[in-house]
Image (spheres, helix red, strand yellow):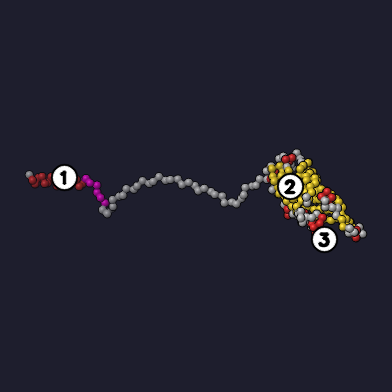
Amino acid sequence: MKRSLSLLIVIAISLTACTAAPQTAGQPESTPVPSPLPTQAVPAPTTVSMTNESPTSTPTTAMGAVYFQIVSEESSVTYEVGETFFNQNNRFNLAVGVTKTLSGTIFADLNNPSASSIGPVQVDISQFTSDSNRRDNAIRGNWLESSRFPIATFESTQIEGFPASYVEGQDYSLKVTGNLTVRETTRQITFDVITRLEGTTLSGSAETTILLSDFNVGPISIAGVLQTEDQARIILQFVARP
């Protein structure tokens, strides 16, 4: 009886071993492979421009209202006055003096020209230089006294002749009336002006005639030597930019 039971146990163990899956010798057990992570899209790099190009500047003609400053280095004021030398057989000479020391502003409304104006213009008359140092020193020290009163000032009060509209590069003729102060004397004078605007450069000329006696500076007379005319011509050549 015991022998029969033992035999049955051995047979059961043998059948169990036969049903197990065979293992290949030397082959390691397989390792589960993890599922790959989902791929994340990488954004394209941003393109940055490295050019040095500046934005195109707005033309002056599109700006409407512009303030111009007189460029002293490119401008000048000139006087012309006739003189007669008695000690040289009444020789006539045209005395000419020039200064480049001046300043001033001009307001131009390109969309409404009649709204334009001229600010005070100041001239350093102590810097007038002619072809004679003797004349220049006499003017500074005695007649014009520009060594004491170096600045002459013109302040406009009325401008006539504005066009209805502005055209680039075209000449315009204006009459500018205002008060001219020399030393401590102020008189009203009128300049005939021709001006034009090309790009950002405003240029032109202004001329007038004054009497020296109106400003108590002449006519200049040196007994037996010379006599100047009372009338003097004043010319302003100007270049102005914003």
The residue shown at (81%, 48%) is 208
The residue singled out by tag 3 in the image is: 134
Residue 115 placement, left or right of 97:
left
93 lies above or below 46: below
The amino acid on which the numbered mark 2 sits, given as a three-letter code, is Pro
Task: Tell me how far mark 1 sits from mark 2, CA to CA.
Answer: 127 Å
The residue singled out by tag 1 in the image is: 12
Residue 180 included in the magenta stretch of the image: no
Q: Nearer the viewer, residue 200 or 234?
A: 234
Residue 22 included in the magenta stretch of the image: yes
Where residue 122 appears, as percent x and y from the top left, is 74, 50
Pick whichever of labels 1 and 3 is earlier in the sequence. 1
The amino acid on which the numbered mark 1 sits, given as a three-letter code, is Ala
The amino acid on which the numbered mark 3 sits, given as a three-letter code, is Arg
Residue extent of the magenta highlight: 19-24
Dot 3: element: helix
The residue shown at (66%, 45%) is 58
Residue 88 placement, left or right of 149:
right
Q: Nearer the viewer, residue 200 or 210?
A: 210
Where residue 190 appears, as percent x and y from the top left, is 80, 45
Pick whichever of labels 1 and 2 is earlier in the sequence. 1
**Nearer the observer, disc 1 or disc 2?**
2
Q: Nearer the viewer, residue 86 or 171?
A: 86
Mark sitting on residue 120: 2
Task: Tell me how far mark 3 sits from mark 2, CA to CA.
Answer: 31 Å
